[in-house]
Image (cartoon, rainbow, N blue to C red):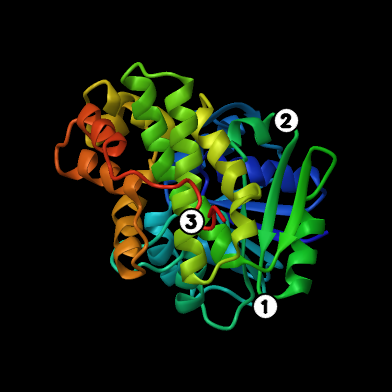
Amino acid sequence: MKKISVIGAGSWGTALACLLNANQHDVTIWSIDEKEVEMLSNFREQKEKLAGVKVADEIKITSDLKEALTEKDIIVMAVPSIFVRSTAKKMAEFISGSPIIVNVAKGIEENTLMTLTDIIKEELPGYQVAVLSGPSHAEEVGKKIPTTCVVGSSDQKTCEILQDVFMNQVFRVYTSSDVLGIELGGALKNVIALAAGINDGLGYGDNSKAALMTRGIAEISRLGVKMGAKMETFYGLSGIGDLIVTCSSKHSRNRNAGYYIGKGMSYEEAMKEVKMVVEGVYSAKAAYALSQKYDSPLPIIEQINQVLFEQKSPAEAVTELFLRDKKMESGTDFWN
């Protein structure tokens, strides 16, 4: 049995806390929001973000960061990506022992272009840091619907420990050394999912969504390889797997926000409608900046940035994508 704290009591943090408790670990959930702590303590349910999933009585709920971080074996970082750095800063003075820190959020920091695990390493030096990602909607994990993820770390033993901790009969975990690829796949697919939602909001069909997803993973993988990630990672769970589920699921906040944008809302209005943090909006500018830094064009992501931040109409963005210069599908495909 491991002593585990989940930092963040949103839908994903709560679902993972329930999973880890079911795996017979000693689990604590921390939230900065006293009202959220009160709700979880009184009703044993995340009524706003994960309704219908019971939080077991033995799971401890707290807003005291010192209590949450003292003598833990594993700390799960489940706060939204935009709060990872500020939360890690607060955690620094309270962590005791040598816990493994697992990031389960998805994003790229806009002003530094750093991945979330790199941010955690910068703010909390000296700890083993890993990432858990993949096609894993909290609503389904909370209901024990079979799900598969990948855990990545530069240290093989850390990966194997986490694989044992998280894995059970309905939650299968693979291991990988490609932390960068896992993080890029998880962050950038959210931007493509906004495009998929816009596709639905415009009333387009399966053909156009399949095109967005296929060309989207091509964009992400080209950039990732230039940055030093492994191509095969983008064909796996944190790449095409996560892209499929985020572009197509009713649970996807990014796809749902995109739908409202396709219907004519601004991204601010769409996020209010979704009532949850829409990570793709925050990752879009960072993704485009990475494309400039590494000279790796991201046509879909470039158009999404223009729709989100430059008031370009979604229909115009689609037209521009289709009328770009003619290309071969694969840069390695040549006739003799």
Q: What residue does disc 2 label?
A: 145
* Residue in the foreground of this view, choosing between 175 and 327: 327
Left or right of 70? Residue 296 is left
Instruction: Determine if residue 63 is in view.
Output: no
| Closer mark to the observer between disc 3 and disc 1 | 3
Check disc 1: other Cα within 10 Å, few if <14, some if 14-19, many if 20+: few
Name the amino acid, label 2. Answer: Ile
* Secondary structure of residue under mark 3: loop
Specify the quadrant of the image occupied by residue 1: bottom right
Name the amino acid, label 1. Answer: Ser
Q: Residue at x 32, y 69 (%)?
A: 293
Q: State the CA–CA distance, disc 3 to disc 1.
A: 46 Å
Q: What residue does disc 3 label?
A: 331
Q: State the CA–CA distance, disc 2 to disc 1.
A: 33 Å
Rendering coords of residue 120 (x, y %):
49, 70
Residue 329: assigned label: none
Q: What residue does disc 1 label?
A: 98
Check disc 2: other Cα within 10 Å, few if <14, some if 14-19, many if 20+: few
In this view, the residue farthest toward the left is 311
Check disc 3: other Cα within 10 Å, few if <14, some if 14-19, many if 20+: few
Left or right of 151? Residue 212 is left
